[in-house]
Image (tube, rainbow, N blue to C red):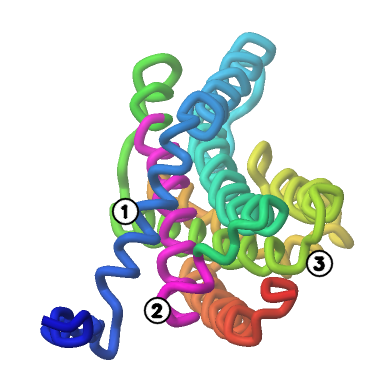
Amino acid sequence: MSDNSKFQWIQPRDPGRVNWYGLWTLYKKEVQRFFKIFLQTVAAPIATTILFMAIFTLALGNLRPDIRGVPFIEFLAPGLIMMSILQQAFNHTSSSLLISKIQGNIVDILMPPISAGEMNVAISLGGVTRGIVVALVSLPCIHFLFVELSIFHTWAIIYYSVSGSLFLSLLGIITGIWSEKFDHLGTITNFIIVPLSFLSGTFYSVDRMPEFARILIDYNPFFYIIDGFRYGFIGSSDSSIFFGVIFILILNIFLWVLSLFLLKKGWRLKT
């Protein structure tokens, strides 16, 4: 039997319109990637959140007045949890692409029969998963160690957890594609992500801010994400929840289209 006839029965696998197996494999790779360094990717941000809670509890105690009828520590906790979700979602996708580019194994993602859309879904969901895992562990830790958190609106907690982490995951993909070295990534983190996180009403109500600073808050997506997430726990907000839902949805659609375009073009990925 000739070699040609021996392998005639072997046919290329048709993945169909959506390569679900390839998408799942890449997503699983992204999840396994951050679980392999669990202490750095999950335990460290949880420890940081607990440390913030401990410092504010010990430093202020009951000295800080209630905010909108809610004890300050109860007001603070959801903001810290969401801030950790956002930062970890961004860190995951941006570092995943940048490290692959620097190590030269980005070809392992580009060569398989996976479309740009499937790649976008898998990588961004990896960031979302990392953010949600951090939240799921942080919530019971804060609940049992510091303050009993109530739940007023479950839909808001779920929506802003997913949409917020997706927003930062997509932003991380775009940053990872753009960055050519860790200095570039550090620039975005230090001058955009961290300032927007701290100027989002995490530690205070925006009612205390001067009028000129409110203009910055009105255009800060981090504010709407954190405010909406906190709304799910305390039942009140500094902004229109409906506007926040629509605003974050529009931003996610825009970032999705932009990241998909960059992945299709292969800009700074194939060169």
Q: Secondary structure at mark 3?
A: helix
Q: Which residue is mark 2?
A: 113
Q: Is residue 28 rendered magenta in the image?
A: no
**Would you name the residue on which mark 1 appears?**
153
Q: Position of residue 63 (x, y in %)?
A: 65, 16
Q: Amino acid at mark 2?
A: Pro
> Eyeballing the image, is 5 above or below 181?
below
Q: Position of residue 59 (x, y in %)?
A: 69, 12
In front: label 1 or label 2: 2
Q: Is residue 250 visible?
A: no
Q: Which residue is mark 3?
A: 215
Residue at x 39%, y 61% (from the top left corner): 26
Which quarter shows the N terminus?
bottom left
- Could you tell which of marks 2 and 3 lies nearer the N-terminus? 2
**Residue 125 or 108: which is nearer the viewer?**
108
State the separation of the CA atoms marked 1 and 2: 42 Å
Residue 211 placement: quadrant: bottom right
Q: What whole-number distance in Å separates the C-alpha atoms at marks 1 and 3?
A: 28 Å
Q: Mark 2 packing: few (<14 Cα in 10 Å), some, or many (20+)? A: few
> Main SS of the magenta segment?
helix
Q: Are marks 2 and 3 in contact (CB under 8 Å)?
A: no
Which one is earlier in the sequence, the residue at label 1 or at label 2?
Answer: 2
Where residue 85 appears, as percent x and y from the top left, is 52, 45
Q: Is residue 107 above or below residue 234?
A: below
Closer to us: 165 or 202: 165
Q: Amino acid at mark 3?
A: Ile
First to last magenta residue range: 109-137
**Three-letter code, disc 1:** His
Magenta span includes 118 = yes
